[in-house]
Image (cartoon, rainbow, N blue to C red):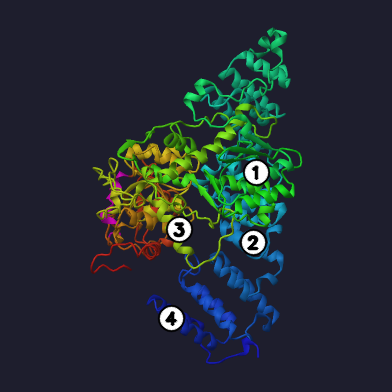
Amino acid sequence: MSCNSRQSAGLDPGELRDSLFELWNQKDLQTMRLKAMQGFSALPQPLDDLLTILQACPGKQKGRSHTLGHHVLLDFQTWLKDHPEVTLSSLPEQQASELQRRALGLMAEAVPSSVDVLIGVYQLQSMEPELLRCHVRRLQDLRCYKEAAVLGMKLQLQPDLGMEEMCVPLILQNKLPLAESFVSGHRRLEEELVAMLDSWCQPGFTVDHISSRFPAACLSKHCLDLLQPKMLTKQVFRLVDKFSIDPGLCSNALHKRRLDSLRYLMYARFVEKSMTEENWCDHVQYVVADDQELQVHLLEMLVKHCSLQTAAQWSLHYSVPRDRLPFGVWEVQQSLPPHLRQLSLADSTQTQDWTASPSHRDRFYQVPLTRDRVQFVDSLETLRSCRDVVLQDGSVVGVDMEWQPTFGCTSSQQVALIQLAVSDRVFLLDLQADGLSQHPDTVAFVRSLFSHPDVLKLGYGMSGDLKCVSATWPQFSEEPLAARGMLDLANLHQKIQQSKVLRTRDRPREVLVGEDSSEKGLSLLVLQVLGRPLDKREQLSNWNKRPLRPSQVRYAVTDAYCLLAVYMVLSADPASFGLPADLRGAVGSGGGGGGPLQRPERSRDKKQKKAAAVQDLECQGAAGVEPPRPHPRHGGGGGGGGGGGSPLSGREPPQLPPIPPQQLRVVCDNMLQGLGRYLRCLGVDVLMLENTDDHRVAATLAREDGRVILTCGQPFQSLRSQVAEGRCLALDCSEKARDQAVRVLRHFNVQPTTSDIFSRCQACNSDQYVAMPRKDMVRLLQQKGFLENDWDDDGDEGSTSEVTSDPPRYAPQCQWAPLSDLDPDTLAFPGGAPIQLHTVPLGLLPRIPHFYVCTRCGKVFWEGSHFERVLALFQGVLNVADGEDEAD
């Protein structure tokens, strides 16, 4: 029996919709679900009547996923499983086609999960492709760019839709990830997207070039950051890696990256003076290559930073045409004597000695080994000799690696040299030797070394080394390397840094380096433990070039052997460095522990281990620290916090007194923008770095405004050293932004209330609003042409501009400006931006009595369902007063 002939009880779809709507308002979802299941069976034409119900649902499908229409649709999908006879194919072809057209019309207002259900129930893939394409284009014409892209992906129409027409409006609205998803899996579209972004990297490009072609697409403020040359170049190379695209398609981005690298090399050599002449020459030739534009840029920089003579020598080396030479270079070039016309790039390997100079020995840490104790491993025979020594049970090995610095010109970095240090010698595994790198014996040795549980491997920042190991040997991607018996001294160093006093036997001594030290990383650890830093001038060497200079060999040997020396000192007296007796247990790196390349095992205590690791990281610099002192106006922080110990030092942090959100002032690194938005939602004073900002900007803002830095990953150590003790908190990057926000609130014992939600502008962090009745909003919309002058304003009760409805929940926590401050011509507040009238949905005007405008950025807010979502997310940390209704 076809579904359209079933009459059952003949329930009217409007009746069912009204009863479901009543239960929805009562928030009785369980009863509503049972009522829906019974009602579907009583509908005379379920597929037809479902569309009638969805079209009549208040709010339809748009916005939140848990609307009435969305629940009805999901319940119907469940009901269909028990009624397989109700199918589109059981209907006459004409009626089925009409239902498909009606279902397609709901797509523009459906959330993605509803789109899947509608496509499945009404079999929309079977429609004529041209009809589907026309509907997607209609969504584009209606400026529903996101909905058009989602529908195109759901119906697998990407090859038939233009990449540029679909993706450019998304990018202009700061939805690049959605554009990536749209082209993903379609090689031609992937290449077109990368090529288009690369074309935007060319000099002289401005956003006007694309926004003028897509005037209907509203340009997002955040999109302007994305379209900056540096960020564009970064995105291009990221997509090249993601889609495995030939970098040759990205000539503009590659040129921009090489030009930036050349600028850095000039700075390092002539301003910072941290690079030797040999290293600088090697890298300049690699970066410039045969690109004449870069050669000209090099000459211009040499004229500025060095001399006309040096520029003239390089111009002869590259045979740059006379008409491209900077002013004065040609004349100097012609006056050069013969012995200076040839650029001196002679190899200095024969002129250097292994023995360091006296001044070098006085300034830097020296390895207590003679040259004959350093063995190059460049053949299978020497490899076997190295393996016999290193892979002995119970041995301790310092492991370091070197690779060719690419300065971002290419993404993959392959290991050129592996240094293995034992107590009386150092092995240099030369992966540039012919046939050695990819030989099965070499691969087997590397696997055995890192997986041997009874050989303790010491390193510093080992995750970066192991990442390069994966890039060097693809075999380790196919069969992951199980890294066991690893001890990363960087983890121990973090624990050492928590204490300002190191103890020796009977008396304390100060840490050798203050917060303003120029030494970082391993060099700082060596200085603190062994008394002298490392000489890092050869760090950015050309490690692919052979033979290596003696200074390079000395650097490579020192970087590996110092790990052994540091470990021996720490093991002899760990307490004097604030470390427990079991150094391996201090960082959870026992003999069987997995490394970064090991597949994660699904164990019962996985969550517990992660929570412990996060808590351990959280203690680095901010545990037990007093929150900022109140600011005269904002209630935010003043000077640096004091005391309190860390759990790692054997003292429990003191319980901090509860504070309101307004007394916590933070600056979020650009990796934690999601966290920053959540904290603003709860009333915390939050500054956020832009994607293009350097991490060091966070330290400047923290010092100037008395803020706490919130960061994650590698920048933590650098930022922590630039601010007072306890003013930098490290978070787990793998956690969701909501969980990070809860962790910050509990860490500082911040107790937000429902009145704090939205007390700050989500866009600009301002806490000053102006209340605008609907009548005034309508007047401004009409004044700027967003609304017809004959708009019916019957829904506006009262004619005064005074606030007559209840104030918003966050009113007590905000500052309120009078509407009279608004400039009638520019529609801007003093010192602020114009009101963003284009963001006000005209369909909301009849239902919203009052709007609230941020006086700094002009963003418009109104009371809606977003409050309940935030309330549900943070109900575990909100402090609800007695008698206060959480759902109010």
User: Few, some or many C-alpha atoms within 10 Å of disc 2 (few <14, some 14-19, many ≥20)?
Assistant: many
Quarter of the view holding residue 856? top left
Magenta region, residue range: 807-821
Q: What's the CA distance linking mark 1 and mark 2?
A: 34 Å
Whether tag 3 and tag 4 are in contact, CB under 8 A, the answer is: no
Upstream in sequence: badge 1 or badge 2:
2
State the residue position of label 2.
152
Q: Is residue 213 visible?
A: no
Q: Residue at x 31, y 38 (%)?
A: 508
- Crowding near the residue tagged with mark 1, few <14, some 14–19, many ≥20 C-alpha atoms within 10 Å: some
Residue 590 seen anywhere in this rendered image of the structure: yes
Q: Which amino acid, by three-letter code, is at mark 2?
A: Gly
Residue at horizontal 64 percent and vertical 75 percent from the top: 98
Question: Do callouts 4 and 1 mark residues in contact (Cβ within 8 Å)?
Answer: no
**Horizontal and vertical percent position of residue 447:** 65, 52
* Viewer-side residue, 299 vs 154: 299
Q: Which residue is mark 4?
A: 30
Report helix, strand or loop for mark 1: loop
Q: Which mark is residue 412?
A: 1
Q: Which residue ends up furthest to the right in the rendered image?
A: 435
Q: Earlier in the sequence, mark 2 or mark 3?
A: 2
Which element carries disc 2, helix, strand or loop?
Answer: helix
Q: Specify which label sits upstream in the sequence, 3 or 4.
A: 4
Kind of element beneath mark 3? loop
* Amino acid on which the number 1 mark rests in the picture: Ser
* Residue designated by label 3: 841
